[in-house]
Amino acid sequence: MYDGNVGSVARAMKNFGFRELVLVKPCRMREFGRAMASHAQDLLDEATIAPSLEDALSGADLVVGTTGKRIGEGQRHLRLHLRVPCLTPKELAERLFPWEGKVALLFGPEDCGLSNDELMNCDLVVSIPTSDGYPVMNLSHAAAILLYELSGIGPGEVKMADGNSLDRLYARYRDWLCSIDYPPHKIEYTMLMVRRIYGRSGLTEREVNTVLGALKKAEWSNGR
Amino acid sequence: MYDGNVGSVARAMKNFGFRELVLVKPCRMREFGRAMASHAQDLLDEATIAPSLEDALSGADLVVGTTGKRIGEGQRHLRLHLRVPCLTPKELAERLFPWEGKVALLFGPEDCGLSNDELMNCDLVVSIPTSDGYPVMNLSHAAAILLYELSGIGPGEVKMADGNSLDRLYARYRDWLCSIDYPPHKIEYTMLMVRRIYGRSGLTEREVNTVLGALKKAEWSNGR
């Protein structure tokens, strides 16, 4: 991100009561970026600098990717499932409302957005409905709109399964697919879809354990 | 407004399908402001320059003023009623929804906002709910959020799986649990949970088919 956008995003975060800014391999902050942050200098000073996306996301229970590239169901290429289905910011807010857990909101660089590989790390994808005439938004505007939609959400009553439990679930799901001779070339695609389904759903620890239990049982049963 | 904000607002307008930008006694547009407009140069070129606020608002059926200064109901000074009650952007959108007419959305200069006199020209006042810790937003962020709420552009075209497909999915899931000797007394509970998970998630037809395919494959594999 260019430093003006970093500063603008910091300001929007503080406007809506968010504090934890994590920057992956950021550009240098110059005077202009500092000025755009206005009274949110503290957020810039406290921002975490992460050497990789993986590091940046390590503490998150749920990763929400943002994309401006929306794609209709009619288009059939495999990669499209990275971006379909997309939630609107309002839908995201409604979905997150009952949950308690740490959610990471992930933005790509302003010139090209999140890559397909980066979107593979996301449990959910959100996109702001814009005009077809000019859908590409300024990054800090997109951030401001998402933070605005998410700002009213306090910690909910239902505790989310933590990120590690989900990782175990996905690993076990993958093992299970292998164990049933699921076509190897379909595994990545199916795992992405599984991740998106459970990501949109939101899972409690208990639900993770139940699904894990069923998969474990299936492997034993199959291995007899 | 400083020219960067004018450009940013033009871009946000085009992002959400708005076109008519009216500037009252504006600053000079420089290179930076033009750059911030990105692909919305046409909006800048077509912008109307008005010599006074009265001129700017002459064609509007309804004037909506924006303010960051929110004032509690408890404060009783007459002037306060300029800003009370304030609608949120969502409330404004709901209120404008059934109407046909020309609505002007009025923003003040970024340093001080609309004056009391300027607010006297407004039919409605809207304010974005922000954090008490730092309520003062960047002007173009505030504009982006309001335009987003007012754009009326619906979500995408992703069609949800229909009820029959989901019934088939749940029946197959139940069969699969039986086939792996899942404890019978746990089946109802687990099926309820599965249904809640997928229900919250929302599934496309394609996703149903993929999960169905995996379950079918599992049963064949297990039955060998």
Image (cartoon, coloured by chain):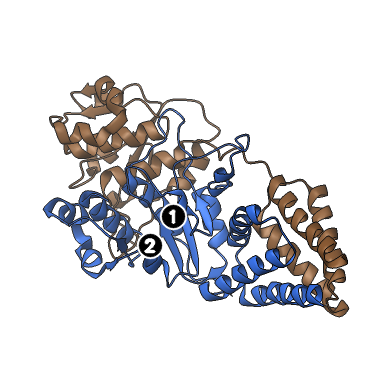
Chain colours: A blue, B brown
Mark positioned earlier in the residue sequence (2 or 1): 2
Q: Nearer the viewer, residue A215 or A210?
A: A215
Q: Amino acid at mark 2?
A: Leu
Say above or below: B223 vs A2: below
Report how far apart the C-alphas of labels 2 and 1 lie in the structure.
Answer: 8 Å
Question: Do marks 2 and 1 both belong to one polypeptide chain?
Answer: yes
Q: Report the chain holding disc 2.
A: A
Residue at x-position 31% and y-position 61%: A24
Q: Amino acid at mark 1?
A: Glu
The reply to whether residue A167 is visible in this rendering is yes
Say above or below: A81 vs A57: above
Q: Quadrant of the C terminus of chain B?
A: bottom right
The reply to whether residue B122 is visible in this rendering is no
When asked about the image quadrant of residue A71, the answer is top right
Residue A32 at what x, y percent from top left? 14, 50
Say above or below: A166 vs A112: below
Q: Quadrant of the N terminus of chain B?
A: top left
> Residue A100: which disc?
none
Residue A8 at what x, y percent from top left? 26, 52
Residue at x-position 72% and y-position 67%: A179
Give the residue number, with chain letter if any, for mark 2: A53
Residue at x-position 26% and y-position 23%: B47
Residue B196 at what x, y percent from top left? 72, 64
Secondary element at image label 1: helix
Looking at the image, do the residues carrying marks 2 and 1 touch, with CB atoms under 8 Å apart? yes
Q: Nearer the viewer, residue A21 or B180?
A: B180
Give the residue number, with chain letter if any, for mark 1: A118
Q: Nearer the viewer, residue B135 or B208?
A: B208
Secondary element at image label 2: helix
